[in-house]
Amino acid sequence: MKIGIIGGGFMGEAFIKGMLNSKKFNSNDIIVIEINEKRLNVLKNYKVQISNTIKDIKNAEIIILAVKPQKLNKVLQDMSFYSNKNSLLISIVAGIKIDEIIHTSLHKKIARVMPNLPASIGYGTSAYITSADIKPKDEKKIQNILDAFSKVVVKVKDENSLDAATAIHGSGPAYMFLILEYIIESAKKIGINEHDAFNLATSTMIGSAKYASASNSNLQELREAVTSSGGTTEAALKILNDGRLKKIIEDAIFQAYNRAIELGK
Ligand SMILES: NC(=O)c1ccc[n+]([C@@H]2O[C@H](COP(=O)([O-])OP(=O)(O)OC[C@H]3O[C@@H](n4cnc5c(N)ncnc54)[C@H](OP(=O)(O)O)[C@@H]3O)[C@@H](O)[C@H]2O)c1
């Protein structure tokens, strides 16, 4: 099965890495269309087929669209002269709706996917939605590709839900980085050096998330299990759980959700 990727930038490369590392795909299966000379040189390392002309998309059975939103319209117009209209389009382009992709590309089988940054190390989280013409066998192909770079894949019910998911997992890595930054800054103020603070904080975040996802207990039970009466955790939680942080996080997620809706208009 030939997979074409249009746009071999940051996310396009993440797809290539994920697919090759999964061993479900090999380099002969993949062709990347990229116009940036520097990126073409980087992509050569993966031994996939590379091309700087959209004509070479003609044999692809699955086409992954990984260009910036402002470039998509032109790419779809150019692509539609050469692409097989039965092929499956997987768009990771933020904010561009399925109807718009169908209208410009003349393809009918579309999946809109929102991956996130850890996809580049095979630890992504992806949410997706499909057009009405996607059949179960197409859906299997989509999931196969998403599984190559995602630990969790969630199918959402409509494009509004994709905007909502974007506010959680698409922007989510930035929220986690900010929390880690603040923890590290505080750690330094109580005498821990930056290197140790980084390792202690990042490892705690990874371990806690893995523990929570492997546990049968809910998050409140897990939190209570770490909190002994009169102890250090309780002292911290008296401040963290006084309602301000809850409100800040809720406001931030609502803002991200509203922005995702605005960008899609
Ligand atoms: N980065 C993320 O964390 C993330 C997460 C979820 C979704 N996304 C979505 O993923 C898409 C790609 O993001 P990215 O960060 O990978 O962008 P990127 O690094 O800019 O990659 C896009 C690549 O496509 C090239 N390109 C532009 N026009 C082209 C054309 N006509 N034919 C072939 N290649 C072309 C660009 O070259 P030039 O630079 O020369 O234009 C660039 O190398 C975006 O739509 C974004 O919304 C990104």
Image (cartoon, grey):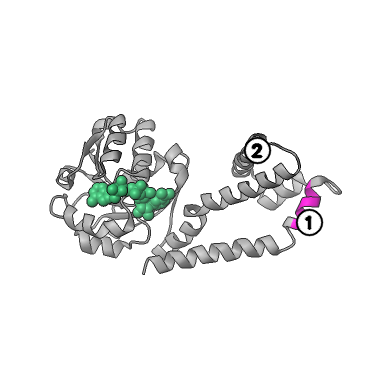
Q: Name the residue: 53% across, 51% down.
A: 174
Q: For mark 2, what is the residue?
A: 194
Asked whether residue 57 appears in the rendered view, the answer is: yes
Classify mark 2: residues with Cα within 10 Å, few (<14), some (14-19) or many (20+). Answer: few
Q: Are marks 2 and 1 in contact (CB under 8 Å)?
A: no
Q: Name the residue: 28% across, 35% down.
A: 41
- Counting from the top left corner in percent of width and height, residue 120 is at 42, 40
Q: Quadrant of the C terminus?
A: bottom left
Q: Quadrant of the N terminus?
A: top left
Residues drawn in magenta: 233-239
In this rendering, the count of numbered labels is 2
Which mark is drawn over residue 101?
Answer: none
Secondary structure category for the residue under label 2: helix
Q: For mark 1, what is the residue?
A: 238
Q: Nearer the viewer, residue 2 or 104?
A: 104
- Residue sitting at the far right: 230
How far apart, in angstroms, are the residues tagged by discs 2 and 1? 26 Å
- Counting from the top left corner in percent of width and height, residue 24 is at 34, 33
Q: Where, by quadrant of the figure, is residue 148 drawn?
A: top left
- Counting from the top left corner in percent of width and height, residue 114 is at 41, 53
Residue 188 placement, left or right of 15: right
Q: Based on the picture, tell me whether residue 238 belongs to the magenta stretch.
A: yes
Q: Name the residue: 63% across, 44% down.
A: 212
User: What amino acid does circle 1 point to?
Assistant: Lys
Q: Nearer the viewer, residue 169 or 74?
A: 74
Residue 161 placement, left or right of 103: right
User: What amino acid does circle 2 point to?
Assistant: Glu
Is the C-beta of the residue carrying label 2 under 8 Å from the nearest atom of ligand 1? no
Secondary structure category for the residue under label 1: helix
Residue 44, placed above or below residue 80: above
Q: Based on the picture, tell me whether residue 98 belongs to the magenta stretch.
A: no
Classify mark 1: residues with Cα within 10 Å, few (<14), some (14-19) or many (20+). Answer: few
